[in-house]
Every structure is written in structure tokens, then in C-alpha cells.
């Protein structure tokens, strides 16, 4: 699907409100014609026919009424468009979130999380202007000018023809304006984006730049880069603005030509065609309509960047939506692999047979001939970094499809406790972060888990305790503190299997103690605990040890 | 509007350009008004003359001047608009250039504590947007109201031809209307920017959480639970957008209809004036048409008000991020001001002594005496800390995360000040050094790895702009990165970072270390040098580090013994004090 087709599909979803917006806009166009007609008629009666103004109370009131109705329709049009855009945004975002969930971490491995969340937020919001303004205006820009020409035609076909003659030029204008705007968007904003990226990069690394004595060079680089960009984009802008100047030019010239033609006609200088029939009424009517003929088109041109922005967003969103979801059973929030839920908590087995794991771009990364862990077992998987330990844990959790072989989970519950490396912390309170382990947990259970994981040790110093918000928008926790929160989350989880990825990496001794204790507690409760690590400290507590050698998982010892 | 003052002052430099830009904008508007008003006058005049001629009266009308005027206005409107856009965009881009440079310089003066706050805050994410809002301050926010006012005055003058009192009245009414529209948009904009701070940020944060925590949430079976939070944030953000967009649209259409209504009332009044022989027919028609031509310059006012509100919010955010530059240890609350004043006495350079600008000539001593550091809500991070390092000695300091190791490093490098006590390098208090003269002799690896989008070579040349390739390969070899770099497509010239090759945390760390090897410092401070490295690589890198450190004074920080290279002495930092770790 091209981005255009993708946008068209979204348009169909909200065709009702979009059509309504266009209808209101067209009704507003009707009022414009009525307003011009009433003004011209009043002037004709009073100025030419010298009739007293008081006779036209009703016409005057009608004129005021027409003018008063215009904002009503304008507001209705804007409101309908804005509602349509809001509907599209809601639907697209919901759909994308579901799709992202179905793709899972394995299907999203090659997109940065920053990029992905920007697609879910900024890119979806970027659709706004296109649906709220551009799409309704597309219809309005065709029908309203046509109606205006028809109205002008009833008065003087030659004057109407001046307007009509410019009609074939309309698509030309649009193409011109479009080309200009598109070039603006493509070249300029790309360059601007790159420049902004470099700027941010330098800002982030300021401390380092200062230490190396390069701050002034970097500042000079930013200024000269921005200036280079200015010179480059001015070259583009000179051409791009020409195209919109053409539209302006025709709009101005049409008024001038119509005014001069009508003036000469009224003076009787033109002695053929309908000009002899011209009156001040018809002349003024056409003159008032001339700028309105071009107005919808100029509005469309103003909103053209909305289209370009939406197309850019559509390209990204369509690409994301086009990512195929592998495996039929893998739907929203469910895990791959075979899980059988027949046994009660405290029993169960994790078994892997003739397993082969592939990762896109890296080929086969790991083979497991046979692996079995029963409830209560502490299993350590060792190996240097980059040999596929994390991939194996992802596969065990059902978050990475296996290329070959089977992973069998026979447990009382399909849930799995997961402690990643680095641990995941949401931008929420510490309490909420722990609760992700079990949404149904009550406060006393959370408090318990927090105590066991050593979270209470540092939350005691915080004013809001467990309700302190952490993450980018709140308190930033040290690595050890974050690990403790994640550990409390694993402890509170009712999952019969817990997977820990490098749980003691770069930790202080106290936190490491908490981790070791928690591993023992979890195992003692009858859960399978699988740990990946290259830390020797964990060897002491493992019941089973495996090592990854030459892309193969091999058992080392069984104590 | 106070927040905008520094930016308004910045505009002064471009006063000439800005005035010319506004003049071009006004010429565009004035041509539009002239075109419509003159056209109305012209056809009415011709209609009256035509009627007289038809009635057999010998009437004439001079048509060449008004005809020429109409054509002139048509052309001048287009030409003025074109050059106005070109000219003003050039000005905006010049402002962008200046703003970037200035903001960068401001940010570069932040102390590390403020820098850390900046890094983690919203400001950095929004920095480029904020700067864009401010560079458009003049073009989209300030000049439209000025041009609109001039256009209203022009129309008032035209109306005064027919009736001076009407001209005056219309100026008052339209100015009030335009001012009201501007104020309403500004007001709505204020609300928008405030709400954006909450609801948009909540959506962004929860969407980010959903993506980064996908593995955890799926595994724990909490995905649906969290999705509800995301959709709720989405709902709120969307309702807010919808409400504000509608209010803006309604405001715009009300302003439009206000102008139309004024035109209609002017028409009726003008017709009355015509009938009472106070004005001529052509002038009576010209008057309402001139008012109608105001739709264009007034129509942009709501957008201008919104722009001003946004620019103000951006200015506020920027000054929150960069405004504290000149105040020492401003990140401390007022409650902790007492010790900080002592510190100022201890660390402050006596003005008459002057700064030490000669750097370090040999491996220096480092002496820390009775240093205390208080953070946040009164937690004593360092408590009467004492440390003496001899020349060419390598001291290792280990301690749990968050115990204040990085603060020691930052204090020795002169990046943060102690609340009390003294820190001397080579016998000189750190505060008495000209830091920029000192830094060439210090290598300081910060806890955060800073790489820049650019090639491997570009990143290494941050340390030494004139480095040749063999020197860079040697540095890469010391950190075991040479084979990896050689295996990439373009070797040293392979692009890393944004829109380039992604490096693992360990590789990035090693590249940052390699950068240090490019220099010849006398004092080395390494904050967690081996983080993210696997055991094998860490051992190899340790070996080259030990050799490199042997002739230099070095302080190496780590979370445990295994995270340090070979050291002469190992100390444990616990509860804010150092003790031997044996």
C-alpha cells in the first residue's frame, strides 16, 4: 500500500463527518453569493435608482442575517473536520498499539523504542491537519468556485469567462504549489531534521566537549552549519515561493481585469455581447465574487503542508502496519510456544528439545539439544555477552519465535516473571511499577515485595515513599535501586516461572545480596528460575548450570 | 511577556531587516485594500457616468488613472508578497542560526548537576521545537498585529474621505475586535501550552513505557492493564486538542464575521450618507469594499496570538533550563544555602590572586580535605571526606551505586563544588584553576558515554583534531576495538550514532576510552571505565589501562573490585567516607 492509499483508507473510515464538513463549507459558499448579491442590489437601488434607503429595511436585515449565519456554518465546518480528525487519530492509534503488541519485542527489534513511541504519538498527531482542514477543503475548492462562476454567468458571460478561463489553470496552480511545497517538505525539512539531530547530539555531549576543550569549536560548527542550511534553503525557497506567487498573481489580476472590463462596459465603450446589458448591480456582484472565487483555492494552498505532513506520517505508519505478524496464534498479549495449564502451582516443567534460534541478519545464533528444568530449580545460563543468552530467555518466554524444535511449558499459569537487562521502569510511581508484576495485587502484598527486594531501604527517605514517580519525569533511580524495584515486581508476580537477564550486572553488593536472596525465595516457593549471567557470584546458588559454547547450550554440572 | 524580553532584545540587531519585512507585509495588505476599494469606486463611477451618457447628458470620466491604479495594485500585491516571503524567511533563518549558537553557548555554561537535570528533562526533547517557535516569534507572532493595525488605520483613512467620524469609529471598533481576537487566541494558547505539559507528556510517557516494557508487560500478563493507561492518556490528550482546535476555529470565524458585519454596517451608513448628499456614490461603494479587504490582514491574528503564547512557553522552558548559569550551586535549595556559602569561601578564587592558567606540567598530587556534600532533602552524600593521592599513584575507589563516587570525580574535575572542605590539585585549589586551561592535562571519563553522530574518526578527533590514522588505530587497539572497526564497511570512516551504525553499550564505552588514549594527560579520572564490557574484554582493556596509567596520577571509580583495573591502593566509599578496602 502506498502512503496515498493508506490515507485514502483512513478517509473512508470517517467519510461521514468529512462529507458533512464539506457540505457546511459549500453552504457557506452559498451565503457568500447571497451576500454579494444583496450588497450589489442595495447599491443599485440606492445609487442608480435613487430610491430611499428606508424602503430596504428587509433587504438590510437579510444582509445582516446572511453575514450572521456565515460564522455558524464556518464553525460547523471546522467542528466537523476537527471531529473527523480526532476519530482518525483515535482509531489509528488504537490499531497501531494492537499491532505493536502483536509484533512483540522480536518483531520490533530493529526499531528504536524512541522512534516507535514517536510514531505512536507524534506521527499519529501529524494526521490532524490533513483530515481536519485539507480533505474537506478539497471538495469545497472545487464546488464553491464552480457555483460562483455559475452565479457570475447569469449576469455577464464574458466576465464569468474571465474567471472560468482561469479554471483550467487551477490544476496547474495546484501542481505548481504542490511541487513547491513538496520540495520544501522533502529537502528542507530533511536537512533541518539532520541539523537538529546534530545540534541535540552536541548538546547531550556538552560535558565531554568541555573536557576536551571543544565547546567553542562545536558552537562555531553549529552556527556555520545553520548558516549553510540557510543559504541552501533560500535557494529552494526562491523557487518554491514563486509557485504560490503565481496563484496570488492570478487572483489579483482577475479582480483587476473584471473591474476594468465592467467599468468600460458600463461606460458603453464595449459594444458587443452582454456588456451592453451591464448594470451597477451585475458589475458589483461579479466584482465582489471575483476574490471569493480564488479564496477556497488559496485556503487549500495554505493547508497544503498538512497534506505533505500527513503523507510523511502515513509512510512511516503504513510501514509499521505492514510488518507481518508471524505465527497465527501469536495475538495481542499472548505468548508463543506450548503452554499447558493442567498442573497446580509448585509443580511443572520447562522443556526444550532440538531447539534452533535465528535472529534476523545474524542467522542461527543458538542451538539447544535438550534442556529440562522442574519447579523449584535455579538454572544458570552462562556465556560471554553477545552469544544469545538474552535471545534464549526471550524464546523461553515466548517472545521470540523459534526456528526449529520445541519449547514446552507445563505450568499452572501462562504468566512469566521477567527481569530484563536493563530493568524496565515505567514513568509511573514505584508502587505502580511493582504492580505490573500482578495488576491484582493489594497494597500489603506490594509492601511485602518491596521490603523483600530492598526497595523500602531507599523509599523511606522519600517524601512520597512508594508513590514517588520515577523515570524521566520524576526521580531518577540509580541502577541498583531500579533493579530492586524490578526485583520486587518479579517477587509479587504469581508466575510459576521467573526469567532473570543479567540480574547482578554492575550492581552494588547490597543489591546483589537482595537478588540472590530473592532467587532463593522464588525457587523455594516452587517456581522455575532461569538466570542468564556472566557473573561468577551466581554459580554458588545454581542447581543447574549451562554454558554457551560455539552457539550451543551445554550443561556443565548438576549439583 | 517577561520571558520573551531577551528574545525581543535579540531582534534589535536586525531592526532594519525587521522593519523592511514589516513594510513589505504592509505593502501587500495595502495593495489588496487599494485594489478592492479602487475597483469598487471605479465601476460605480463608470456606472453613474454611463447612466448619464445614456440619458443624453454630456458626462466624462477620467479612466486612465484609476485603471492604471487597479493594474498597479494587482501587480504590487503579488510582487510585495513574493519578496516579503523570501526576505522574511531569510531573516527567520538568520535568527535560527543565532538562537542555536546562543542557546548552545548558554547550555555549555551549565554545571554538571544542571546538565544532568537537563538531560533527563523534557527540555532536551523539545529543544529544537522551542527554538523554532522563538525564531518565528517575529514573523508569525509580532509583525501580524502591527501590520493589521496599520491596515486598519489605512482603511480608516479611506473611510474618512466619505465621513471622518465613520473612519474614526471603524478604527476603534476594528482595533477592539482585532485586539479581542488576539487576546483570545493568546489566552487559549496559554491554556494549550499548560495542558500540553500534562496530557501530551503523559501520553508520550505511557506510549514509551508500552514500547520499552513490551517484553515485561507481555510476560507478566499485564499488557492489557497497561494498555488501558495508554488509551486513557490518549483520550485525554485528544479531547484537549479537539476542544482547543474548535475554540480557535470558532474564534476565527467570529472575527471574520465581525469584519463582514462591519462592512455591511459601513455600506448601509455610506448609502445613507450618499442619499443625504454627504458623499458621492463611488465613495459610498468604495467604503465597505475597503473594509472587506481587511479580512486578509486580520484573519491571521488568531494564529499570531497562539504563536505568541507558544513562543512564551518555549522561552520559559528555555530559561528554566539555562537561566541559572551565573548563580553558583543554584541547584541547592534555600535550606542548604548555609554550607554552600562556606564552600564558596573555601573553593572560591580570591580575585586578587588570579587564576592559574599554566595547567599541569607533571603528574600532580590530589588532596581532598574535610569535604562534605549535601544533596536533595538533606542527605549527606559525602561527609568530611579525606583523600591524598601521590603523583603517579593509581587509586581505586569502590562503592555501591549512588554513594557519591561520581560526585568525587566531578569535584576533582572542578565541575561541582563541595559544600565545605578543600580540593587541591598540584597544590592549587581546584577553584583557582582556569578550568579550560587545566582540561588539556586532565582525562576524565564521565559515567555517561557521550558519542557524537559522525565517523569513528570524527569521534576520536574530538580528543585531538589533528590526529593521524596510525594514532587512532593505536588508541582503538588499546581498547580492543581495532578488529571491530576494521571489520566495518568503511573502517575509521564508518558513521556511528544517529542514522549510522548502532554500537553496543560496551563498544561505545570503549570508544570513549579510546578517545582518552589519544591525549597525554597528567591526571586521569575514570568513572566506571569497564561498564558494559564482558569479562574477557574487560581484562584486556584493564591491562592496557594499567600500563597507560603508570606514569600518571589516576583515580578510578567502580562499583566493585572487579570493575577496576590494577590499582596501587583500593578504597571503599561507604556512608560518605573512605576506608581501606582489604
Image (cartoon, rainbow, N blue to C red):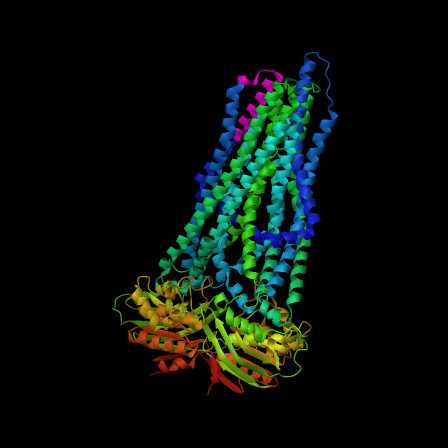
Q: Position of residue A47 (x, y in %)?
A: 62, 19
Can residue B448 be seen? no
| Magenta segment main secondary structure | helix
Depicted B44 relative to depicted B506: above or below: above
Can residue B119 be seen? yes
> Residue A540 vs residue A4: left or right?
left
Res. A545 image quadrant: bottom left
Q: Position of residue B377 (x, y in %)?
A: 45, 68
Locate the C terminus of chain A and report the quarter of the image it occupies: bottom left
Residue toward you, A358 or A267? A267
Residue toward you, A364 or A71? A71
Which segment is the magenta one? A29-55
Q: Position of residue B60 (x, y in %)?
A: 73, 18
Q: Residue furthest top?
A: B56
Magenta segment: does it hold A42? yes
- The residue at the point 43 percent across, 49 percent down is A90
Depicted B262 relative to depicted B109: above or below: above
Q: Position of residue A49 (x, y in %)?
A: 60, 15
Residue toward you, B446 or B421? B421
Amino acid at each position: 500500500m502506498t502512503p496515498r492509499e493508506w490515507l485514502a483508507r483512513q478517509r473512508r473510515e470517517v467519510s461521514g463527518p468529512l462529507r458533512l464538513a464539506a457540505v457546511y463549507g459549500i453552504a457557506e459558499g452559498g451565503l457568500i453569493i447571497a451576500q454579494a448579491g444583496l450588497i450589489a442590489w442595495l447599491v443599485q437601488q440606492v445609487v442608480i435608482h435613487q430610491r430611499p434607503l428606508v424602503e430596504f429595511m428587509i433587504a438590510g436585515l437579510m444582509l445582516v442575517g446572511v453575514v450572521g449565519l456565515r460564522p455558524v456554518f464556518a464553525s460547523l465546518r471546522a467542528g466537523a473536520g476537527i471531529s473527523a480528525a480526532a476519530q482518525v487519530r483515535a482509531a489509528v492509534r488504537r490499531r497501531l498499539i494492537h499491532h505493536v503488541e502483536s509484533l512483540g519485542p522480536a518483531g520490533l527489534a530493529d526499531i528504536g523504542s524512541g522512534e516507535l513511541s514517536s510514531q505512536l504519538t507524534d506521527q499519529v498527531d501529524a494526521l490532524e491537519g490533513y483530515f481536519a482542514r485539507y480533505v474537506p477543503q478539497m471538495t469545497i475548492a472545487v464546488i464553491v468556485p464552480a457555483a460562483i462562476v455559475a452565479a457570475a454567468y447569469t449576469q455577464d458571460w464574458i466576465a464569468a469567462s474571465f474567471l472560468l478561463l482561469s479554471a483550467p489553470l487551477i490544476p496547474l496552480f495546484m501542481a505548481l504549489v504542490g511541487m513547491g511545497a513538496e520540495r520544501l517538505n522533502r529537502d528542507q525539512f530533511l536537512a533541518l531534521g539532520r541539523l537538529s539531530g546534530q545540534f541535540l547530539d552536541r548538546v547531550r555531549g556538552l560535558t565531554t566537549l568541555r573536557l576536551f576543550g571543544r565547546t567553542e569549536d562545536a558552537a562555531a560548527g553549529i552556527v556555520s552549519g545553520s548558516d549553510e542550511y540557510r543559504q541552501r534553503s533560500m535557494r529552494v525557497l526562491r523557487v518554491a515561493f514563486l509557485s504560490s506567487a503565481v496563484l496570488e498573481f492570478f487572483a489579483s489580476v482577475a479582480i483587476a481585469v473584471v473591474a476594468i472590463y465592467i467599468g468600460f462596459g458600463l461606460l458603453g465603450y464595449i459594444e458587443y455581447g452582454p456588456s451592453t446589458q451591464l448594470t451597477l448591480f451585475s458589475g458589483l456582484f461579479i466584482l465582489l465574487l471575483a476574490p471569493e472565487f480564488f479564496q477556497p483555492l488559496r485556503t487549500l494552498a495554505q493547508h497544503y503542508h498538512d497534506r505533505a505532513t500527513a503523507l510523511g506520517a502515513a509512510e512511516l505508519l503504513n510501514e509499521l502496519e505492514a510488518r507481518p505478524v508471524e505465527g497465527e496464534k501469536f495475538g495481542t498479549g499472548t505468548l508463543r510456544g506450548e503452554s499447558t495449564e493442567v498442573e497446580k502451582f509448585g509443580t511443572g516443567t520447562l522443556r526444550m528439545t532440538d531447539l534452533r534460534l535465528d535472529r534476523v541478519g545474524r542467522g542461527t545464533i543458538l542451538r539447544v539439544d535438550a534442556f529440562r528444568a522442574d519447579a523449584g530449580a535455579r538454572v544458570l545460563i552462562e556465556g560471554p555477552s553477545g552469544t544469545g543468552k538474552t535471545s534464549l530467555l526471550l524464546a523461553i518466554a515466548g517472545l521470540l519465535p523459534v526456528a526449529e524444535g520445541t519449547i514446552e511449558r507445563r505450568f499452572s499459569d501462562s504468566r512469566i516473571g521477567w527481569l530484563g537487562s536493563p530493568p524496565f521502569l515505567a514513568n509511573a510511581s514505584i508502587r505502580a511499577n511493582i504492580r505490573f508484576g500482578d495488576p491484582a495485587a493489594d497494597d500489603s502484598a506490594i509492601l511485602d515485595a518491596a521490603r523483600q527486594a530492598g526497595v523500602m531501604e531507599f523509599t523511606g527517605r522519600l517524601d512520597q515513599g512508594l508513590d514517588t514517580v520515577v523515570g524521566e519525569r520524576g526521580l531518577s533511580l540509580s541502577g541498583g535501586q531500579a533493579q530492586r524495584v524490578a526485583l520486587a515486581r518479579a517477587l509479587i508476580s504469581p508466575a510459576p516461572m521467573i526469567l532473570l537477564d543479567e540480574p547482578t550486572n554492575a550492581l552494588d553488593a547490597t543489591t546483589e545480596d537482595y537478588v540472590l536472596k530473592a532467587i532463593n525465595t522464588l525457587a523455594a516457593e516452587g517456581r522455575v528460575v532461569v538466570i542468564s549471567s556472566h557473573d561468577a557470584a551466581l554459580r554458588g546458588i545454581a542447581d543447574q548450570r549451562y554454558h554457551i559454547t560455539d552457539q550451543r547450550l551445554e550443561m556443565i554440572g548438576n549439583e | 511577556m517577561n520571558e520573551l524580553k531577551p528574545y525581543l532584545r535579540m531582534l534589535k540587531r536586525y531592526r532594519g531587516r525587521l522593519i523592511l519585512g514589516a513594510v513589505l507585509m504592509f505593502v501587500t495588505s495595502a495593495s489588496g485594500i487599494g485594489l478592492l476599494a479602487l475597483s469598487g469606486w471605479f465601476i460605480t463611477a463608470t456606472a453613474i457616468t454611463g447612466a448619464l451618457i445614456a440619458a443624453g447628458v454630456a458626462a466624462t470620466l477620467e479612466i486612465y488613472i484609476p485603471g492604471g491604479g487597479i493594474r498597479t495594485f494587482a501587480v504590487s500585491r503579488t510582487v510585495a508578497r513574493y519578496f516579503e516571503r523570501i526576505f522574511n524567511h531569510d531573516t527567520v533563518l538568520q535568527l535560527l542560526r543565532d538562537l542555536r549558537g546562543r542557546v548552545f553557548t548558554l547550555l555549555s555554561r551549565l554545571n554538571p548537576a544542571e546538565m544532568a537535570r537537563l538531560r533527563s528533562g523534557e527540555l532536551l526533547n523539545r529543544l529544537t521545537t522551542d527554538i523554532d517557535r522563538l525564531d518565528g516569534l517575529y514573523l508569525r507572532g509580532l509583525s501580524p498585529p502591527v501590520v493589521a493595525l496599520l491596515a486598519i488605520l489605512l482603511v480608516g483613512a479611506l473611510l474618512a474621505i466619505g465621513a471622518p467620524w465613520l473612519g474614526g469609529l471603524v478604527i476603534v471598533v476594528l482595533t477592539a475586535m482585532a485586539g479581542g481576537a488576539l487576546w483570545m487566541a493568546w489566552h487559549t494558547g496559554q491554556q494549550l501550552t499548560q495542558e500540553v505539559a500534562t496530557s501530551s507528556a503523559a501520553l508520550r510517557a505511557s506510549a514509551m513505557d508500552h514500547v520499552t516494557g513490551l517484553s515485561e508487560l507481555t510476560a507478566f500478563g499485564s499488557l492489557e492493564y497497561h494498555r488501558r493507561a495508554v488509551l486513557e492518556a490518549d483520550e485525554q490528550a485528544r479531547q484537549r486538542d479537539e476542544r482547543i482546535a474548535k475554540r480557535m476555529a470558532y474564534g476565527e470565524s467570529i472575527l471574520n464575521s465581525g469584519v463582514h458585519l462591519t462592512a455591511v454596517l459601513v455600506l448601509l451608513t455610506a448609502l445613507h450618507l450618499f442619499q443625504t448628499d454627504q458623499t458621492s456614490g463611488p465613495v459610498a461603494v468604495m467604503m465597505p469594499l475597503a473594509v472587506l479587504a481587511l479580512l486578509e490582514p486580520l484573519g491571521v491574528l488568531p494564529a499570531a496570538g497562539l504563536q505568541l503564547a507558544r513562543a512564551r512557553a518555549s522561552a520559559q522552558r528555555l530559561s528554566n533550563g539555562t537561566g541559572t548559569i551565573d548563580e553558583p550551586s543554584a541547584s541547592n535549595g534555600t535550606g542548604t544555602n548555609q554550607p554552600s556559602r562556606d564552600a564558596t569561601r573555601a573553593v572560591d578564587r580570591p580575585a586578587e590572586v588570579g587564576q592559574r592558567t599554566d595547567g599541569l606540567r607533571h603528574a600532580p598530587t590530589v588532596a581532598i580535605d574535610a569535604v562534605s556534600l549535601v544533596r536533595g532533602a538533606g542527605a549527606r552524600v559525602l561527609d568530611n571526606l579525606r583523600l591524598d593521592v601521590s603523583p603517579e599513584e593509581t587509586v581505586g575507589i569502590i562503592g555501591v551505586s549512588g554513594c557519591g563516587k561520581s560526585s568525587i570525580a566531578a569535584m576533582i574535575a572542578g565541575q561541582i563544588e563541595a559544600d565545605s572542605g578543600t580540593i587541591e590539585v598540584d597544590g592549587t585549589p581546584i577553584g583557582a584553576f582556569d578550568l579550560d586551561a587545566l582540561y588539556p592535562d586532565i582525562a576524565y571519563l564521565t559515567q555517561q558515554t557521550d558519542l557524537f553522530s559522525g565517523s569513528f574518526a570524527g569521534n576520536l578527533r574530538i580528543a585531538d583534531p589533528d590526529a593521524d590514522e596510525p594514532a587512532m588505530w593505536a588508541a582503538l587497539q588499546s581498547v580492543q576495538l581495532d578488529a571491530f572497526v576494521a571489520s566495518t564497511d568503511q573502517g575509521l570512516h564508518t558513521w556511528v550514532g544517529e542514522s549510522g551504525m548502532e554500537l553496543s553499550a560496551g563498544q561505545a564505552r570503549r570508544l570513549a576510552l579510546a578517545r582518552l588514549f589519544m591525549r597525554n594527560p597528567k591526571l586521569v579520572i575514570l568513572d566506571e571505565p569497564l561498564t558494559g564490557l564482558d569479562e574477557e574484554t574487560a581484562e584486556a582493556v584493564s591491562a592496557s589501562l594499567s600500563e597507560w596509567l603508570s606514569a600518571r596520577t589516576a583515580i578510578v571509580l567502580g562499583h566493585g573490585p572487579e570493575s577496576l583495573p590494577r590499582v596501587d591502593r583500593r578504597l571503599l566509599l561507604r556512608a560518605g567516607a573512605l576506608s581501606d578496602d582489604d
